[in-house]
Image (cartoon, rainbow, N blue to C red):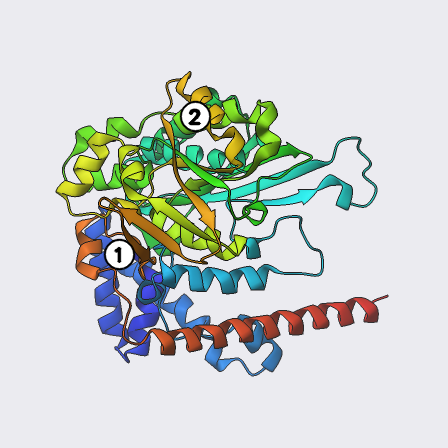
Amino acid sequence: MSDLEGLTRRLIMQNKTDEEILKRLVQEYTDFKDINKESAYTLASAILTECKRSDISKISEPFIKDLLDINMANVSVGKQGVGCRGVGDFFVHKLLAELSETNKKPFLSPTSLDDAGAVRISDIKGFEVEDDLIIVSKMEGIHSRLSDFPFVCGFHVTRACLRDLYVKGAEPISIMIDVHLADDADVGKLFDFMAGVSAIAEIAGVPITAGSTLRIGGDMVIGNRLVGGISAVGIARNKLLARRNIRVGDKILMTEGAGGGTITTTAIYSGNHNVVNETMNVKFLEACNVILKKEYLSDIRAMCDVTNGGLRGDLYEINYEAKSGVTIYEQRVRELVNPVVLELLEKVGVDYLGVSLDALLIYCEESISEQIISDLASRNIKCAEIGYVDNSNQVNMIYEGEVKKSILPKFRESAYTKIKQEIGEETPEMRLEMEKKIEKAATKALKKRQKIIDYIKKQSITNV
């Protein structure tokens, strides 16, 4: 995929001549499209013209310039590890959560760093209901490396989205789709993706209610990439299984995990395609369906999924929200990982504690742990107690031989593809300096938001 607009702006910044820019754009066009050089030159000229005309450095009106300008952090998302589910990603998402805060407070907000968000019907003016209904919502992004494998891409992103509703104790009632394809993507790619999405919708019994299909960047991006996401809405009654409910002394259970999009990606890009088959199941959803129908649901504090960043990252985030610590028995966790998947991860040198396993974590009172394990076993779903909640504020892992270690998430999740392994998982030397720049950019964005709000409110008063 080639971002022609981004490329053009970059070349302009490098003081390249028009001729040099047009030559490069023509090359991009002829690499991706079956067109002659004359047609490519016409298109390239149009792009160069638009990029020059949209240059905001020539704007004289301060308000318009401020509105269209970006408060740059001068730190790229790649360097910061955004989306890589490690410490770098967590840092940025905490700031994003703060930017999401408004005067209208939800029941479960992004600042909780939980699996999903929620609002209570009783908190909405004019709604009166007998039950304390809670509307739970989730947005899940497509796994970027599965663009060329749209069926499994759609299957896994939809399953992941629904599981984030289930773990909050909600019954999914609606699935929505946002999918973007680059200009040269075959329409069949869209149909294959939708088939994967609707396969999960059919199995889970949740209707698809809305969607959006667009091209990435309109005419400015060429190639065949597929990106986007799935959102879903669910309803919980009277109780939300949020991380903030966790208490010291709670037992931690985990179900078997064979992974989803991340394991599929690891398998495909390491040439171990047969492992993809292990991920094609809905045991996570089945486990949640069993638990949510039981009377002991009231004794479950919280449920979470072991997602990108792995158990190591999830436990760190959960501790942060629950203001507690955990002690985990590594061997018990290892025994719950699908053996074919575990063999793959060990073969390609990936730490299984740092990648998504599609396993369910259950925080509950000790009195019901054995019953949960038994109920899931009756449905052929493995589940075991892997540890307990303590007041250490750390993730303590007990390894074979009773060796106890405190573990922390790395700057990025476990490197599960060759390119990720080349980039590495370690913390950049400039981490603190990068964080200061990022915080400054977030603060400026907040000030900009308030400035625009004040402007719009003033305009509304003036026009009355």
Q: Are marks 2 and 1 in contact (CB under 8 Å)?
A: no
Residue 315, percent from left and from top:
41, 50
* Badge 2 amino acid: Ile
| Direction top: furthest residue | 378
Q: Quadrant of the C terminus?
A: bottom right
Tell me the kind of residue under disc 1.
Answer: Ala
Percent coordinates x, y for residue 236 in the rendering = 63, 33
Question: Where is residue 337 drawn, in percent x and y?
Answer: 28, 34
Question: Measured along the vertical axis of the image, is residue 391 above or below residue 439?
Answer: above
- Of 218 and 429, nearer the camera is 429
Q: Between residue 275 and residue 196, name the one nearer to us.
A: 275
Say whether residue 46 is visible. Answer: no
Q: Residue 373's mark?
A: 2
Instruction: Name the residue rendered at 51%, 71% in the picture.
Output: 442
Number of marks: 2
* Residue 444 placement: quadrant: bottom right
Q: Quadrant of residue 256?
A: top left
**Badge 2, how many Cα within 10 Å: few under 14, some, many 20+?**
some
Question: Residue visible at 77% across and 41% down?
Answer: 122
Considering every residue shown, the one lying at the far right of the view is 464
Asked which secondary structure carries label 2, the reply is: helix
| In this rendering, position of residue 299 left or right of residue 430 | right
- Counting from the top left corner in percent of width and height, residue 312 is at 35, 50
Which of the numbered marks, if any, corresponds to residue 40?
1
